[in-house]
Amino acid sequence: ETVLTQSPGTLSLSPGERATLSCRASQYISNTYLAWYQQKPGQAPRLLIYGASSRATGIPDRFSGSGSGTDFTLTISRLEPEDFAVYYCQQYGNAPWTFGQGTKVEIK
Amino acid sequence: EVQLVQSGAEVKKPGESLRISCKASGYSFTSNWISWVRQMPGKGLEWMGRIGPSDSYTNYSPSFQGHVTISVDKSISAAYLQWSSLKASDTAIYYCARPRSDYAGDAFDIWGQGTMVTVSS
């Protein structure tokens, strides 16, 4: 199974700052089948990015994804108050699909 | 509006059986696979398995194979996740999720609200 390792575990930043989240895969992810989700307490996850770099419908352009192969990045250009949450990467290129352990973006 | 609506919270005892549901609306149910995702208390997301509603073909994560059963009822556009004998370690929130396209391997853009399952003696 493809293990996804996210770093850092927690990111402490202030509103307006730039957030850079990493997701590293234990093996090559075919077709850049890598997604990013945001989850807030008590809510279901929300799709942000699919195909490593395509924004889902309605997602603001401050969210961007990049990477290929085994190394992927989610960047939030300027943090808004509503962006403080937990972020998960997920690969759907190699069965079974797997998620990273999550990165919590908290207010500094 | 495309949505997945899940059944309500459950409290069960170890050894009991359980089936939770995920009812789809707003799209052609047989067009998209449905997956189930577990989230244990305070933990991350785990993909459990998926089902193709048109033919009930299933894939399971090895971690969940043999422990749960995924099924559908096309007549009412519902997917199910069931256990024959619950354990305390099954305590979690369970989400159903739909990929953004009719291709089985795609990111999940529609999620149910989650069903909390508590297993305690």
Image (cartoon, coloured by chain):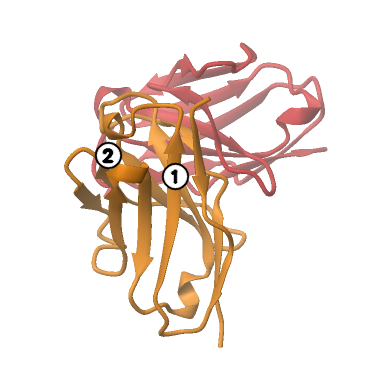
Q: Name the residue under label 1.
A: B23
- Chain identifier matching the red colour in the rendered picture: A
The kind of residue tagged 2 is Gln
Task: Please name which of the two marks, 1 or 2, marks the residue nearer to the observer.
Answer: 1
In-front residue for pair A48/A79: A48
Residue at x 49% of width, y 28% of height = B2
x and y percentages locating residue B58 in the rendered image: 21, 49
x and y percentages locating residue A64 in the rendered image: 55, 17
x and y percentages locating residue A87 in the rendered image: 58, 38
The kind of residue tagged 1 is Lys
In-front residue for pair B26/A78: B26
Q: What element carries label 2?
A: loop
Q: Quadrant of residue A72?
A: top left
* B72 lies above or below B65: above
Q: Mark 2 points at which residue?
A: A27
Which chain does tag 2 point to?
A
Q: Label 1, label 2: how many angstroms apart (C-alpha)? A: 35 Å
x and y percentages locating residue A78 in the rendered image: 73, 17
- Chain identifier matching the orange colour in the rendered picture: B
Residue A37 seen in the figure = yes
